[in-house]
Amino acid sequence: MKKSILLLVGVLLLASFLTGCATSVKVTIERPAELDLNGAKTVGMLPFQAKSTSDMGGRKDAIIVVMDFLGFHDWYYDQDDEDRKQLADLLTRKLQEELSQSKYLELVDSNRIQYALTAGSPAPCDVYLTGAISRFETSIERVERVRNYAEGKQTVICYYRHIDAELMYQVVDAHTNRVISYKTVPIELDSRETEDYDMVDSVYSLGRSTFEELAETILKQLQPYTVDKYLYLLSDPHKDDDMKYADEVVKAGSVEYGKDLFMDLYVKRGYMEAGYNAALLLEALGDLEGARDLMQEVFDIFKDTRALKAVEDIKAEIESANKLQYQNDIRRN
């Protein structure tokens, strides 16, 4: 039993080592916006509220009463609530900064949006965004910990901040007041522990990075975004010097030449790994259909599940690229 466990550990370590040493190609890919905004060219937003109005939470109707979102009151009373308002302001500011630099959408001034909606007029944009921290609870928790000191173990009291909240936001078609998307995002955070009660993280310091990440998540729904993807080549089990050279060429940054070398080895020597790598490099070069067809051929011949997984991944990339093209075309037209 012990030998079996040691053998399993050895295999896992070897697999980890081989994966870590695999040659990879970094590809920057543009993804389509997660929402189809029907060719929207302008976007507006109302400031996120620190607390929802009475009708804001839970509204999922196709048509919303936009006046529900115009009650911009000061809902804060103590420091925790002030920090909460600062988090809502941070989310608003981050979104406005990013949208103001967007190459896809023109940001309309929020004062114009508020003025139009208050007057009962259509918002002067194609779509607009609004939302609130619809639920928010925070507390400082106490916990006992055992610490090792020179004189021995001691039990100490530690404190940490806990946040349990929910963010709600909606994307609205300004021409019809139809809700395009309604989202609620649960938020649960714990700060680092400290023995000094006065050194417990504030609401704002604990929530800041999370709310900045939420802004990025919301932006992905509104406009295309880029991601970095790594394509990992298969190592050569044949110990062929030509395979090694092709791999070194790719490592040196010559992706197209490396693709040609692997393709030649696949055709002349029938290496599954060479065909797989050539297909991945076609994907890296942007020839998704060619990559799909070659990878499908590799799977049909060798029945290797790695090739099947790669085929499905390339198909997903083609679908994503087609969606991005559609969004760009409808926006231009």
Image: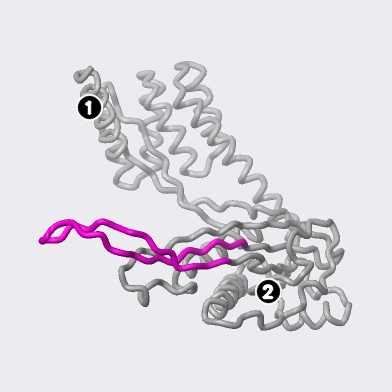
Picture quadrant of residue 10: top left
x 52%, y 81%: residue: 79
Image: 183 above or below 51: above
Give the distance between the C-alpha atoms of the residues marked 2 and 1, in whole angstroms: 56 Å
Which residue does the numbered mark 1 point to in the structure image?
Answer: 10
Amino acid carrying label 2: it is Leu
In this rendered view, identify the residue nearer to me: 158 or 250. 158
Looking at the picture, how far across and down is residue 5, in whole percent? 24, 23
Looking at the picture, how far across and down is residue 22, in whole percent? 31, 37
**Badge 2 element:** strand
Left or right: 314 as drawn, with respect to 149: right
Residue sitting at the far left: 150
Q: Quadrant of the C terminus?
A: bottom right
Q: Which mark is residue 107?
A: 2
In this rendered view, identify the residue nearer to me: 271 or 210. 210
Amino acid carrying label 1: it is Gly
Q: Is residue 262 visible?
A: yes
In this rendered view, identify the residue nearer to me: 77 or 53. 77
In the image, the segment drawn in magenta is 137-166
x 73%, y 83%: residue: 111
x 44%, y 26%: residue: 306
Query: Residue 154 colored magenta?
Result: yes
